[in-house]
Image (cartoon, rainbow, N blue to C red):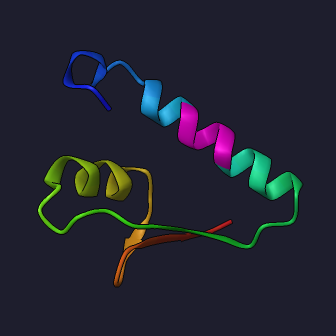
Amino acid sequence: MHPEYRGQGIGSLIMKFIEDFGKEKGVDFIFLGCDADNQSARKFYKKLGYGEDYGFYKNL
Protein backbone atom coordinates (compact mmCIF):
# COMPACT_ATOMS: atom_id res chain seq x y z
CA MET A 1 0.00 0.00 0.00
CA HIS A 2 1.19 3.51 -0.74
CA PRO A 3 2.80 4.98 2.41
CA GLU A 4 0.36 7.91 2.39
CA TYR A 5 -2.53 5.51 3.06
CA ARG A 6 -0.87 3.18 5.60
CA GLY A 7 -2.11 3.10 9.17
CA GLN A 8 -5.71 3.99 8.30
CA GLY A 9 -7.15 0.46 8.47
CA ILE A 10 -7.69 0.21 4.71
CA GLY A 11 -5.49 -2.87 4.29
CA SER A 12 -7.18 -4.59 7.23
CA LEU A 13 -10.62 -3.92 5.74
CA ILE A 14 -9.52 -5.30 2.38
CA MET A 15 -8.06 -8.43 3.98
CA LYS A 16 -11.22 -8.97 6.07
CA PHE A 17 -13.33 -8.73 2.93
CA ILE A 18 -11.09 -11.26 1.16
CA GLU A 19 -11.17 -13.64 4.13
CA ASP A 20 -14.96 -13.39 4.53
CA PHE A 21 -15.49 -13.88 0.80
CA GLY A 22 -13.20 -16.90 0.87
CA LYS A 23 -15.09 -18.44 3.79
CA GLU A 24 -18.39 -17.97 1.95
CA LYS A 25 -16.92 -19.78 -1.07
CA GLY A 26 -15.57 -22.67 1.01
CA VAL A 27 -11.89 -21.68 0.98
CA ASP A 28 -9.93 -23.44 3.74
CA PHE A 29 -6.79 -21.30 3.82
CA ILE A 30 -5.08 -18.30 2.28
CA PHE A 31 -1.45 -18.28 1.14
CA LEU A 32 0.30 -14.94 0.58
CA GLY A 33 3.75 -14.18 -0.73
CA CYS A 34 5.96 -11.14 -0.32
CA ASP A 35 9.62 -10.29 -0.68
CA ALA A 36 11.73 -11.34 2.29
CA ASP A 37 12.91 -7.76 2.76
CA ASN A 38 9.40 -6.27 2.78
CA GLN A 39 9.25 -5.85 6.55
CA SER A 40 6.10 -3.70 6.58
CA ALA A 41 4.08 -6.35 4.71
CA ARG A 42 5.46 -9.13 6.90
CA LYS A 43 4.55 -7.22 10.06
CA PHE A 44 1.08 -6.49 8.67
CA TYR A 45 0.35 -10.14 7.82
CA LYS A 46 1.56 -11.30 11.22
CA LYS A 47 -0.66 -8.68 12.90
CA LEU A 48 -3.63 -10.19 11.07
CA GLY A 49 -2.85 -13.65 12.42
CA TYR A 50 -1.01 -15.16 9.44
CA GLY A 51 1.75 -17.66 10.17
CA GLU A 52 4.99 -17.57 8.20
CA ASP A 53 6.49 -20.60 6.45
CA TYR A 54 7.78 -19.98 2.88
CA GLY A 55 5.13 -17.25 2.62
CA PHE A 56 2.19 -16.39 4.85
CA TYR A 57 -0.84 -18.58 5.45
CA LYS A 58 -4.01 -18.56 7.51
CA ASN A 59 -6.56 -21.29 8.03
CA LEU A 60 -10.08 -19.99 7.62
- What type of secondary structure mainly makes up the magenta span? helix
Q: Seen in the image, is 51 located left or right of residue 14?
A: left
Where is residue 14? Give x, y as percent.
Answer: 56, 34
Where is residue 38? Give x, y as percent.
Answer: 17, 55
The residue at the point 32 percent across, 32 percent down is: 1
User: Which residue occupies the extreme right position in the image?
Assistant: 25
* Image vertical order of residue 58 relative to residue 19, above or below: below
User: How many numbered discs, if any?
Assistant: 0
The residue at the point 87 percent across, 52 percent down is: 24
Where is residue 16? Give x, y as percent.
Answer: 61, 40
Indicate yes or no whether the magenta region holds residue 59: no
Magenta extent: 14-18
The residue at the point 78 percent across, 67 percent down is: 27
Where is residue 30? Give x, y as percent.
Answer: 60, 67
| Image quadrant containing the C terminus | bottom right
The residue at the point 74 percent across, 46 percent down is: 20
Q: Seen in the image, is 54 located left or right of residue 28?
A: left
Answer with the quarter of the image where residue 6 lies: top left
Q: Seen in the image, is 33 located left or right of residue 2?
A: right
Answer with the quarter of the image where residue 23 lies: bottom right
